[in-house]
């Protein structure tokens, strides 16, 4: 996760994505992604303005059998807000409910952002 985060902070979302994919290959240990590694990739996408890719990550995480966290959704909502993509906020909200995050988590997320989750 550390290398993926460093790539994102450097504005290199493609490299972050490559590192994320590389760790899962047999020659690099066939490492199963963790929530931290996935969140680092979401943050890399978000910091580089790749809101479409960030928005896909909760579903991609479930496909990898990794549970999205409140932080996952926080990063996605943040990048959506930064790029005026609020019509997608309802989709993210529904994904939070699917992930078993109740109103308590949604309110906590709303308090950490300057945006209102619908």
Image (spheres, rainbow, N blue to C red):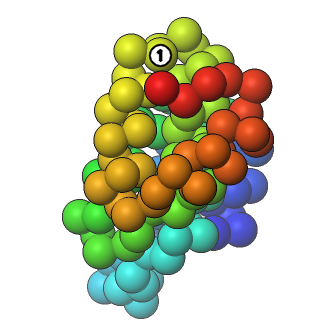
Vertical relation: 16 (above or below) 116: below
Q: Residue furthest left?
A: 63
- Residue at the front extreme of this rendering: 103
**Residue 19 in view, yes or no:** no
Residue 10 horizontal/vertical position (percent): 75, 41
How many marks can you see? 1
Name the residue at 49% across, 76% down.
Answer: 34
| Residue occupying the far top of the picture | 84
Residue at the image point whose x is 29% and y is 70% from the top:
64
Name the one closer to the observer, 85 or 11: 85
- Against 93, residue 4 (above or below) is below
For this rendering, which residue is in front, 37 or 24? 37
Q: Quadrant of the N terminus?
A: bottom right
Relative image position of residue 111 (x, y in whole percent):
75, 39
Q: Which residue is mark 1?
A: 86
Place residue 13 in its image quadrant: top right
Percent x, y for residue 19? 51, 62
Q: Nearer the viewer, residue 111 or 78?
A: 111
Mark 1 Cα-neighbour bin, 10 Å: few <14, some 14–19, many ≥20 = some
Q: Secondary structure at mark 1?
A: helix
Judged left or right of residue 106, residue 66 is left
Work out whether residue 65 can be spotted: yes
Q: Quadrant of residue 39?
A: bottom right
Q: Is residue 3 left or right of residue 18?
A: right
Seen at 63% across and 31% down, the residue is 78
Residue 47, placed above or below residue 27: above
Q: Does 37 appear above or below 73? A: below
As drawn, is 104 to the left or to the right of 91?
right
Q: Which residue corresponds to the image point at 52% horizontal and 71% vertical from the top-left?
A: 35
Q: Position of residue 115 (x, y in %)?
A: 67, 23
């Amino acid at each position: 996760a550390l290398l993926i985060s460093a790539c994102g902070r450097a504005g290199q979302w493609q490299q972050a994505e490559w590192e994320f994919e590389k760790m899962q290959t047999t020659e690099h240990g066939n490492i199963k992604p963790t929530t931290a590694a996935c969140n680092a990739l979401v943050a890399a996408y978000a910091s580089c303005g790749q809101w479409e890719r960030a928005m896909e990550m909760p579903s991609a995480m479930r496909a990898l059998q990794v549970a999205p966290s409140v932080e996952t959704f926080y990063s996605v909502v943040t990048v959506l807000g930064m790029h005026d993509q609020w019509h997608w906020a309802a989709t993210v909200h529904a994904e939070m409910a699917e992930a078993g995050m109740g109103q308590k988590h949604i309110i906590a997320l709303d308090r950490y952002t300057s945006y209102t989750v619908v």
